[in-house]
Structure formats: structure tokens, C-alpha cells
Image (cartoon, coloured by chain):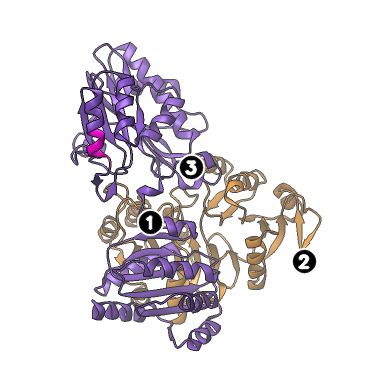
Chain colours: A purple, B orange
Amino acid sequence: MNLHEYQGRALFRAAGIPMPDGDVASTPSEAESIARRVGGTVVVKAQVHAGGRGKAGGVKLAKTPGEAGDAAERILGMTIKGLVVQKVLVVPAAEIATEAYVGLVMDRASQRPLLIASPAGGIDIEEVAAKTPDRIRRVIIDPRYGLLPHQAMGTAFFLYREIAAARAAARIMEQLYQVFTGNGCSLAEINPLVTTPDGRVMALDAKVSIDDNELDRRPDLALLRDESAEAPSEVQARRANLTFIKLEGNVGCVVNGAGLAMATMDLVKFYGGEPANFLDIGGSSNPEKVVNALRIITSDPKVQAILFNIFGGITRTDDVANGIKAALAQFPVRVPIVVRLTGTNEAEAVKILQGIGMTALSDMDEAVRNVVGLAREAA
Amino acid sequence: MTIFVNRDTRLVVQGITGRDGSFHTRQMLEYGTQIVAGVTPGKGGQRFEERVPVFNTVAEAASATGANTAVIYVPPVGAAGAIFEAADAGIGLIVCITEGVPVMDMTKVLPYVRERGARLIGPNCPGLISPGQSKVGIIPGNICSPGKVGLVSRSGTLTYEIVNHLTRNGIGQSSCVGIGGDPLNGTSFIDCLGAFQEDPGTELIVLVGEIGGTDEQNAARFIQEHVRKPVVAFIAGRTAPPGRRMGHAGAIISGSSGTAAEKVAAFEAANVVVMQRPVDVVELVRTRLQRA
């Protein structure tokens, strides 16, 4: 789960990381009063889960509180990469001497937290890594001992030659590590970490992603989820305990298991179709899940045909058939449905489907070819 | 011959009285897995289905029954604790089925397990099966058959799809191992490839990977250097958009890395044939088994 910058700032502040003052606003008048309180020139920043906010016009400088209100007026409601801006962050414009990068990620290769730092801050770190790898320093951290003092200091000296700045940066790295481990992060990043002309070191941005698996035991973090930043169908799916990702095609897919769901999308594409979604109904599929899945998929006007691909192991295929039957009794489905099912209780499932005038295929390839053909005819 | 589990596997089920644990314990018993003990704190002294003794702790279960393998069906918040406990009790193979284990927990679990010389498979995995000998986890026994193909996969139902094609076409398996869909797991493709290479009962290896991370790329390099047996691969997620977690926590393209194209290219560079469709496994395996 990605946090907004203002939410990340709150976690950074709680850990003591120095940042410019400022606050989040939902209206121009709120933005104006924050600007008046912090004083001087401010930056008004759109709070959306999208990179390239500046280029899209979502970041503006304002010299007076009135200008801050005007900037907020223009940014609020703006659409950046398909996302409507609901909130802006208002912070004093810092005077910047240097910009660096400091981030912590969960590293899959070493299976440990990884500290990444670069004196080339303010730009895309992947680009720095690709073009000037010698300007990146990576330190693998043993989570049982945490970020050790010499690891932090060594990395800080890679960024700054001044002892005072290095000490301040090392302290920030330790605080960032607390944020990372204390909140089950998969990413905690400061880009840029700046020095000011008067020698202070501070974080100008806060980018945080939380491991979704933490949210069950951390209701405080789960509350930070901003559903307005997601596709409504994805919100609906999560509430129904379905894993759903909306895509751009016209073949709706209902599958049990993530790997099979991906393979099904790939096969749709292989046969010349375009998947409308990724949808995993999970292992124990009660009929209600299937009803919800169909409701979500049919609400997408682009969908021209729907494929069920169910390999019954723990999932009982008769549960899925009953779900299809229940859904069709509850609301009209105006597009053709192709059902492929095999495995646990297959014979019962076939009987249930026959009872409502449907047939079931047992072969995945045949089912995908059929559904792609039907979607093409309808288009 | 097989890898990791066989007729000598003596299994303890952690969370045996829970909803999932009890269901799958029945299935494993029916398959013929030697289940020697169950663990549910507070239910020590009871018997599961009147045959499997239940203990309060894994240590008690292990010393009373000689269990050498553990399978874990406990909720996500307790899963890390269950793995620590099994490793401390001297269990050599620990299979964690649980989905949703916090990754931060795994960073501590993994070195702990390794330092005790144990192997962890999973979490978030379907477990493993050596057809005709032992099934540990949730892979349906009826779709597998004994034979010479070793299979390793990051997925559950996609594995079933592929195994089913093999079995229905008369191609049996030595062992099928689901290593799980999480970003940090105990056993990698390389661990399984190495074990299959050493196993005299395995003549060919099928590897089922997916987007996210670099485990497949590492596997491709390892195959080039160390695997003499033919390998056939499948990669799921060619159509997955970047930055989205495709069901499995580990199935995510981060920035420009972890794409299907990158993995397919790595395998092809290692002379591993990558199938386009799950059904292609039959033809590819058949021709390579004949050649071998």
C-alpha cells in the first residue's frame, strides 16, 4: 500500500526526521491559512499516487498566502495520470544547497532491508543506478542487529564530507530505519535529502510503501488507505475479499489462484484477445464470492465476454457453478459467459450449469479460444 | 526417487485442529502421508480423528514421535512464531502454507532457520508431493502420478494445471514442489534445481515461474552452470502491468525489473525452452525425455 507524501511525512516526523513545517489541505482557504502560518514562500504539492507531479503541473510555488490559495484552487480537482487530486500539501520552500538520495527497500536478493544512498538526489534513482552506478552505495542490513552505527556513518560520509552534515545524515538514516521496520515498510525513501545554505540537513519528500501483509495486525496503518485514489471496482473487490486489478481489454476473467489467473490473461492475449482484468477468487470460493466477482466484472462497460477458468483443488467447482447460478438469478448478464472447470466436484458443477442451460468445458485452451472469439464478434 | 519428502517423511501438522489444518490433514492421511503428530497449544493429549496424537508444542511432538518434517497451517500473525518453534525443535524440513505472513517477520525467520540447518519451503505455498509416497501441503493427490519429471513452481493452481496435463498424458513426476509466491521465501528455484540434478529418480525438470524479482534469472544462470538434465520453463504474467501486485505478494514488476520478457530472455540464453501455453508442456517434455 502506497502512502501519500503527507502521510509519509507524519511517520517521518514521529521518528524525528527533520522536515520543513507545513500541513495538508483539502480546500484553497485551508491552503491559504497554512501558508500564512508557516510564512514566506511555500510550495503547494498535489497529493496523488503518481510520479511526475511537477511536470503535470501539480507542484506550484506561491509567494504569498493568497497565491497559495490560488495555487491550491488550480491543483485541487486536477487529474494527474487518471487520478483526481483531493488534497494538497503546503510546505515552506526550502533554500537548497545540495540534494542527495536516501532510501530503504526490502531486498529480495539478500532477503534483508537494503539502505541505498546517492549524492545525486532529486532525480529518478533507477536512472542514476543505470547511468552512474558508482554514485550509488548499497548497504545490506541484518534485521537482528539493525542499522549499525558504522554503516550509517560510512554511508553519510559517502554523501557529505563535512562532519556535521554527515552526523546529521547518519542520524536521519537511523530514524528512517526505525520508520521502515516499525511500520512494516517495503519502501521508505527520502528524495531529495537536502542541505541548506545554513548547514542543516533535512528531508524534502517522503515516499513510503507498507507491506500489505502488515495491515491486519496494524489497524492504525490500514486506516491510511485512501480509497479515492483507487479504481472503484478495485475497492469493491477488496471489500468482497477478491484480488482484482482492472485492465484495458474486453475479456473479463474469473480465475482461482494468482498464477493461473496470470496464465489465463496471457493465454487470452496469445489467442489475440485483450484481458479486461486480473481476478483471483482465492482458494475457498464460496458462491457469494463468485456473485461479487460477476457483479464487478459486468459493471465494466468494455467487457464483451467473460471467462471462468477454475481448477478445483481446495476450490470446489460446484461452489463456483452455484455462484454463477445465483448471480444470473440476481442480475442480468448481457455478455456471453464461457466456463471452464475441472477438478473437485466437477460432475456436480456440470449438472448445476446444465440446469440453467449452460455448458462447461474442461480444457483451458479451448475455453480461451472460445471467449476470445465471442469478444471479437461482439466488438 | 524423490526430493525433500518420501516414504520416510514423518510429519507433524502445526495448527492441526484449525479449519484449514484439519481439512488438509484428512486429505494427507487419505493420500498415505505418515502423519505422526499434530500441534495445537491447549489441546495436548487429544487425538485427531482418533489416530493422530496432538501435542501442545512442537518440541514435545518431535521428541515423542520422531517427526522430521513440519507443515504449518496457522494464521499469518502466528506463522513466523510457528516456523521459529519448528526450527528450534530440530525439525529438518518446515513447510509453511500460510498466506499473508508479514515480510518483516520473514527477514528474521530466514537466517534463524538456516543457522539451525533446517530447510523452509514457503510461506504462501501449496507445499510439495512425491507421488505415491508422501504429500505435505495442499496439492491435490489425484492429479499427480509417480514418474521421472521434477517440477518446481511459484504458483498453486497453475502448477495443478501443468501437472494435470503431464499425468493425463502418461508422464509421471518424481516430486512437485511449490516454493510460494511471496517476495522472501525459504527455498528458491536454485535449491530445487540442485536437488533435482542430484536426484537419480529425476530425468527432466519443469520450472514454473512468474513476474517479479530475480529468482528465475538466477535459476537460468544456475542451469547453465550446474544442471545437466533438460529443463522446460513457463513464465506467468506476460500481460501483467508494472507496479501492480498480481495476487501473489511477490508477483510485481518494480520499475523496469522483474518482467516476463526479462525472465524468458534469461532462460533462452541458458538454452531452456520456454513454453507459450501450459498445454505445451506435454509435447516439450515428451520430446526432451526421448532425447535424454
Q: How far apart are marks 3 and 2 (CA)?
A: 46 Å
Q: Give residue A3's position: percent from left, percent from top.
A: 39, 40
Closer to the camera in the image, B179 or B287: B179
Q: Give residue B148's position: percent from left, percent from top.
A: 47, 72
The residue drawn where x is 47% and y is 73% is A311
Instruction: From the image, state whether disc 2 or disc 1 is nearer to you.
Output: 1
Which residue type carries mark 3? Answer: Leu
Residue count near mark 2 (Cα–Cα under 10 Å), binned few <14, some 14–19, many ≥20 = few
Which residue type carries mark 1? Answer: Pro
Q: Residue at label 2? A: B51
Q: Distance between the residues labelled 3 and 1?
A: 17 Å
Residue count near mark 3 (Cα–Cα under 10 Å), binned few <14, some 14–19, many ≥20 = few
Q: Please provide the residue range marked out in magenta.
A: A71-76
- Disc 2 sits on a residue from what chain? B
Q: Residue at label 1? A: A232
- Disc 3 sits on a residue from what chain? A
Above or below residue B19? Residue B279 is below
Above or below residue B63? Residue A185 is above
- The majority secondary structure of the magenta stretch comes to helix
Assign a secondary structure to mark 2.
loop
Closer to the camera in the image, A249 or A116: A249
- Disc 1 sits on a residue from what chain? A
Q: Which residue lies furthest to the right in this view?
A: B45
Residue A269 visible, this orientation: yes
The residue drawn where x is 49% and y is 62% is B177
Q: Residue at label 3? A: A223
Which of the two labelled residues, at mark 3 and mark 1, occupies the earlier sequence position? 3
Q: Give residue A302's position: percent from left, percent from top.
A: 28, 68
Residue count near mark 1 (Cα–Cα under 10 Å), binned few <14, some 14–19, many ≥20 = few
